[in-house]
Image (cartoon, grey):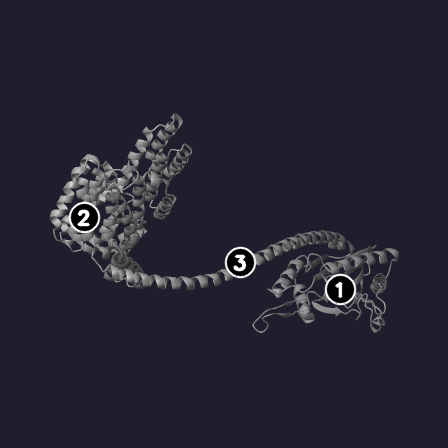
Amino acid sequence: MKRALAFVILMLQAVACLALDDKWSDKKDSLLALCNSSFGSYECLAHCEEGIRCAHEADDLYSETSITMLKVATYFNLRLFDRVIEFCDSLEHDGIIKQRYPRGFYIMMSYRSEAYINKGKYRLAMEHAKEVYDAGMDMIENKFSNKKIGAIDGKMVVAAAIENMSCAYVNIGRRDLAVEYLDNGIKMCREDVDSLYIYFLELNHYKFNALINSYVAGDDDGFVEDYMQAIDVYKKYAGENVCESDEISFVCEVCLAKLKIAIKNNDRVEATKLVDRLDRMYDEDEVLKYSKSDYYLTKVDYCMYVGDMRKALAYCDSCLMDEGVWQDEESVLRTLRQKLEANHKIGAYDKDYTLAKQIMDISDSISHERMSASIEEVGVLMGLDMAKMETQKKEAEKRQWAMIAIIAVMSAVLIVVVFIIRQNKQQKKILELEVARQTKEINEKNRDITDSINYAQRIQSALLPNINDLKNNGIEGAYVFFKPRNIVSGDFYWAHNEGNKMLLACADCTGHGVPGAFMSMIGTTLLNDICANEQGLKPGEILEHLDSQLISILSQKGQTEVQDGMDVAMIRYDAQSRILQTAGARRPVYLVHNGVIKEIKGTKRSIGERDANSRLCPFETVEVKVERGDTLYMCSDGIADQFGGQNPDFPNGKRLKSAGLKKMLEELNRFTIGDQQAAIEKMYTEWKGSCYQVDDVSIIGLRF
């Protein structure tokens, strides 16, 4: 990777020296400074985009190529491997850079191979690395039409390809082939070491890593001699040509390698020293903070080696949290196996199934990848029968074409199905939009209606009398419990004063809500007119007048369709004589004297009733004399008809009925008149419970 970054910097420096015009030259100098200062960050990507655009506008393809290489390198440094692959594929498809600047193009293509290695796709990595390798060999043999391309350019491309091929071979278990390619590359770079020192250094580094992997795996033939030679070469050139961060990384890698060897050789003292040194390096050096995955993996080995399983599990979890580990399935597999082993050693078996399933899934993926790579890449090097392979390939192609035909037919069917589904979705969307439009329209209308009803409720409330005014007519106290089922009510109460005499009515109109509210306003208006035109009428006489006038207004004669009316309880009280006159249209009056409740029933006839037989019964007026402390109750049928009292025998509740109402009034009478309104509201709420309110509720209480 270092060789590609160095090549990018060299190209950018060359770009900075080119001056097609002063304005673009200044811009390139500025971009070079910004890219160098922000390399490897998302900020650098933004500068690269700007540079590519400006170079394209200036028709400076060389600069555009150089900055494009920096963009690819930055993608790689940010571990955006999918973006690296996608971007390189697009450059290959475009072909302009490949034709004009092949060396830069194939160096960029080496990033694609390395990205596939980091994703664990070794077959694809070798396939693309072989393409780069072949292109580099053509450059060396001067087969390119571009005469500016020389052998040194080809050797750079070949070295980059060998690095990726060796990594792929190591990962599929063919370290011998990896070392063979690396030795050839090192020999090639040694011939022009002054021009290719970075590649020479990198190839030795790769060989060093390959040998370590081979030794730790148990394949240690000739390891010591080759290992020492690789270290000597790397140290020699690292000290002269590589920056401080590379030296730190190399020292760290050497320590990690030595730690693996110490663990294998059961040298606990040396292993402990190396762990302490690595801990200090990773704690103190910022350069290493993005590459902790190898460190975590090796620390897991060490902790398991010394028997500290809990620390081993902690490092396993740290390793699995590192994004870099998940780019390499073998590292993940190794970590999961170590975690499973550590859990067993401390007796934690509860996570066995999950870990085992993950291990099996990743093992299957790696086995398939290795098999594909071995057949397509390694097989040629081992001298397999190519003719036989070609025959098998043709047979496979026939099967493939047959499969393609089947897939084509299935695809056609699928397209039809998708088209039908899409049409249904479009129709559904149109329907949903129409439903949404209508819902909005309905909501707006509902809001307008609700606003109108709320205004009507204010008007209805204004027409109801103030019950506290009754105290001026020889009444100790009075209250009203008024609870409409809807916003407006079909119940109403009415009061009228005639000197020291007081008229009071509690009425229940047909229906509730808006229809009932209309009837209540008619009833209030008619009662006011009756008492204004004729004084001294008894309650029964007032009800007769109310009945006849309501029928006249609604034309309820004979077989007319309108059958609305009201049930009314009415009293007339003379404060001087303490005589109470009562009359009712299907509604009683309850009088409590000395704790005993008496029901004074009304006439079995409603106001506005058209039945001829019922109209034969006149509204009867009953007179009683009340004493101080007596209590009178008038109410609509809403409370008696209310469902409630839920229990296991009546899960949906039952009606309160008249008997239940009387018991409630007897209990209510024990309270002072000032506390009764709150008491009756509580009793009603407790009785109703979670049941729905079935009707408007009105109760008037008076204490003489």
Please tell me whether mark 3 sits on a helix, a strand or a loop.
helix
> Spatial distance from mark 1 to mark 3, Cα to Cα?
54 Å
Answer above or below: position of 416 versus 18: below
Residue named by callout 2: 257
Which residue appears farthest toward the right when viewing the image? 534
Residue 1 image point, x, y percent = 27, 43
Instruction: Return the disc, 1 or 3, that comes first in the chain's sequence.
Output: 3
Instruction: Return the disc, 2 or 3, that comes first in the chain's sequence.
Output: 2
Q: Are marks 2 and 3 in contact (CB under 8 Å)?
A: no
Quarter of the figure with the C terminus:
bottom right
In front: mark 2 or mark 3? 3
> Spatial distance from mark 2 to mark 3, Cα to Cα?
59 Å
Residue named by callout 3: 422
Residue 29 image point, x, y percent = 35, 29
Residue 195 image point, x, y percent = 21, 36
Q: Nearer the viewer, residue 174 or 345?
A: 174
Q: Kindly identify the amino acid type of the residue bearing the numbered disc 3.
A: Arg
In front: mark 1 or mark 3? 3
Residue 317, visible in the rendered structure = no
Classify residue 231 as left or right of residue 601.
Answer: left
The residue lying at 69 percent from left, 56 percent from top is 487
Q: Nearer the viewer, residue 129 or 310?
A: 129
Please tell me whether mark 1 sits on a helix, a strand or a loop.
loop
Q: Kindly identify the amino acid type of the residue bearing the numbered disc 1.
A: Thr
Q: Kindly identify the amino acid type of the residue bearing the numbered disc 2.
A: Ala
Residue 424, visible in the rendered structure = yes
Residue named by callout 1: 510
